[in-house]
Amino acid sequence: MSTIFSKIINREIPAEIVYENEDILAFRDIRPQAPVHILIIPKIMIAKITDLNGAEHGEILAKMFDAVNIIAKNEGIAESGFRTVFNCGSDGGQEVFHLHLHLLGGRKMNWPPG
Ligand code: AMP
């Protein structure tokens, strides 16, 4: 199943890409919920990891978090702090079924989340 994120990976639609390596692509969320709001995705659309339930590939998750560390530094939020979120499924508020990690920062986050 292809999603809007596949189109971003294939450069079929534009996105503001902030980081890329062999396995990972990261770009600014089109509807930012914080001054810094970046989506970090695996470049391959592994059928089994459309969401966190299927994310049995620890290796790709580790690579996603490696990217978080790099991007947080680049965006200047490593020191002030940030939040990472995986929305999973309907109750989790997931809209796009290609595994993605939200990196949010640049303001104080609220808790509990809505
Ligand atoms: P989620 O609700 O966790 O599935 O998050 C999907 C995110 O993708 C939302 O925050 C959307 O704003 C974002 N999004 C959807 N389409 C695009 C796009 N074309 N470029 C960047 N972000 C997008």
Image (tube, grey):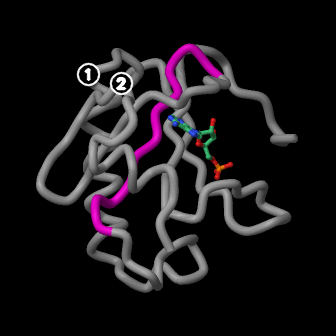
Residue 108: mark = none
Query: In the displayed structure, would residue 86 be above or below residue 34?
Result: below
Distance, label 2 to label 1, CA atoms, is 14 Å
Which segment did they paint magenta?
Answer: 34-44
Query: In the displayed structure, would residue 92 be above or below residue 35?
Result: below
Amino acid type indicated by mark 1: Asn
Residue 74: mark = 1
* Residue beneath disc 2: 16
Number of labelled discs?
Answer: 2
Residue 7 covered by magenta stretch: no
Q: Residue at x 25, y 53 (%)?
A: 24
Q: Quadrant of ligand 1?
A: top right
Q: Residues within 10 Å of mark 1 (few under 14, many from 20)?
A: few
Question: Whole-percent x and y of residue 32?
Answer: 61, 23
Question: Whole-percent x and y of residue 11?
Answer: 28, 41
Please identify the quarter of the rendering in which residue 79 is found.
Answer: top left
Secondary structure, magenta segment, majority class: strand
Q: Residue at x 78, y 29 (%)?
A: 110
Is 114 displayed left or right of 6 in the figure?
right
Amino acid type indicated by mark 2: Glu
* Ligand 1 within 8 Å of the CB at mark 1: no
Q: Residue at x 33, y 55 (%)?
A: 64
Please identify the quarter of the rendering in which residue 92 is found.
Answer: bottom right
* Helix, strand or loop under label 1: helix
Camera-side residue of 14 and 23: 14
Q: Residues within 10 Å of mark 2 (few under 14, many from 20)?
A: few
Camera-side residue of 75 and 2: 2
Question: Whole-percent x and y of residue 87?
Answer: 67, 57
Question: Whole-percent x and y of residue 27?
Answer: 38, 34
Is 99 displayed left or right of 15 in the figure?
right
Task: Pick out the residue farthest to the front.
Answer: 12
